Amino acid sequence: MTETAERLKFELSQLSVKDRAELAYFLIHSLDEEVDYDVESTWDVELMRRMQEINEDAASGKPSNQVFTDLREKYL
């Protein structure tokens, strides 16, 4: 890693959690050089379908704490 990158890494570590999260989001997405519009379109359709199910009370779900508890029991 370059000296500049090391300096930035230290300085950025001093930011708030929210600012670091936004920066991480930006950096991760900056790695995507090419957008696959077919995939994006497919996900848009799926998200709209799921939103419609939620709005129509047709979707069922569990509280997140229960989901995470189940996952911990299964994998840890």
Image: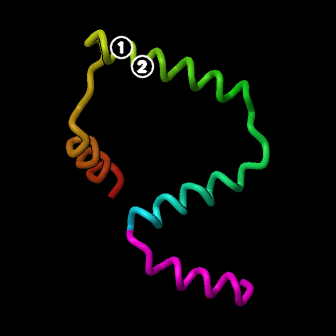
- Image coordinates of residue 76 in percent, x first then y, are 32, 58
**Tag shown at residue 53:** 1
Identify the residue at horizontal 59%, vertical 56% (top origin). 26
- Image coordinates of residue 4 in percent, x first then y, are 70, 85
- Image coordinates of residue 68 in percent, x first then y, are 28, 47
Say what secondary structure mark 1 lies in: helix
Amino acid type at mark 1: Glu
Q: CA distance from mark 2 to mark 1?
A: 5 Å
Identify the residue at horizontal 25%, vertical 41% (top origin). 64
Amino acid type at mark 2: Arg
Mark 1, other Cα within 10 Å: few <14 / some 14–19 / many ≥20:
few
Comparing 62 with 57, the one in front is 57
Numbered range of the magenta stretch: 1-16
How many numbered dots are placed on residues in this image?
Answer: 2
Mark 2, other Cα within 10 Å: few <14 / some 14–19 / many ≥20:
some
* Dominant secondary structure (helix, strand or loop) of the stretch shown in magenta: helix
- Left or right of 60 on screen, residue 35: right
Q: Which residue is mark 2?
A: 50
- Tell me, yes or no, whether the highlighted magenta stretch contains residue 7: yes
With respect to residue 25, does 13 lie above or below?
Answer: below
